[in-house]
Image (tube, helix red, strand yellow):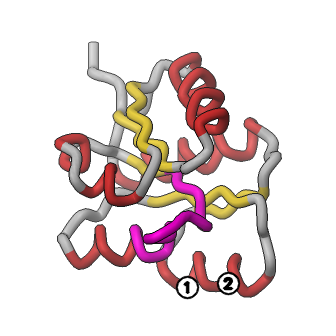
Amino acid sequence: MSTPSVISVVDDDASIRASMSNFLRSLGYDVHTFGSTQEFLGSACLNDTSCVISDVQMSPMDGLELLANMRIRGYAAPVIFITAFPGESVHAGAMKAGAIGFFAKPFATSMLTACLDAALSQRGDVGA
């Protein structure tokens, strides 16, 4: 039996972190949650993360800066962005930065699941 993929959720909203964690755990993933990009980047989970689901608009470092920082450090885990402010320029910036998905809150969990499955299969992870 393979170990479940590790999904890291980075969002400054505690209710989003809790609901995402519950949902992803129900799918069989190992989930770690972080209230800021700095908390995630400073964690030991960075090395084990198969995919990151991150809010776009956080401070002082936003999700796009998180993605750029991960790539500079050599971490290739795919990133899926979620946001309550889904403007076209934000969407375009996220996709140009290399995001594998971009969803406006609230989003259909089926769409997130499909994107997550695609991200993990692209990486060669078995999934949950």
Q: Image point 67% across, 84% down: which residue?
A: 92
121 is higher (above) or lower (below) than 5: below
Residue 127, label in figure: none
Label 1 sits on residue: 96
> Residue 114 lies in what quarter of the image?
top right
Q: Position of residue 6 (x, y in %)?
A: 35, 35
Q: Image point 80% across, 46% down: which residue?
A: 107
Q: Is residue 77 left or right of residue 120?
A: left
Instruction: Give the crowd class for mark 2: few <14, some 14-19, many >=20 residues within 10 Å.
Output: few
In the foreground, 37 or 60? 60
In the foreground, 100 or 24? 24
Dot 1 amino acid type: Lys
Q: Is residue 115 left or right of residue 85?
A: left
Helix, strand, or loop for circle 1?
Answer: helix
In the foreground, 82 or 1? 82
Q: Image point 51% across, 67% down: which residue?
A: 59
99 is higher (above) or lower (below) than 43: below
Q: Position of residue 128 (x, y in %)?
A: 44, 25
Q: Image point 29% across, 74% down: which residue?
A: 71
Label 2 sits on residue: 92
Q: Which residue appears farthest toward the top when viewing the image?
A: 1
Question: How far, Cα to Cα, is label 2 from label 1?
Answer: 6 Å
Q: Is residue 58 on the magenta stretch?
A: yes
The span picked out in magenta is 53-66
Say if mark 2 contacts mark 1, CB within 8 Å. Answer: yes
In the foreground, 40 or 74? 40
Dot 2 amino acid type: Ala
Q: How many marks?
A: 2
Q: Position of residue 88 (x, y in %)?
A: 79, 82
Q: Is residue 9 left or right of residue 114?
A: left
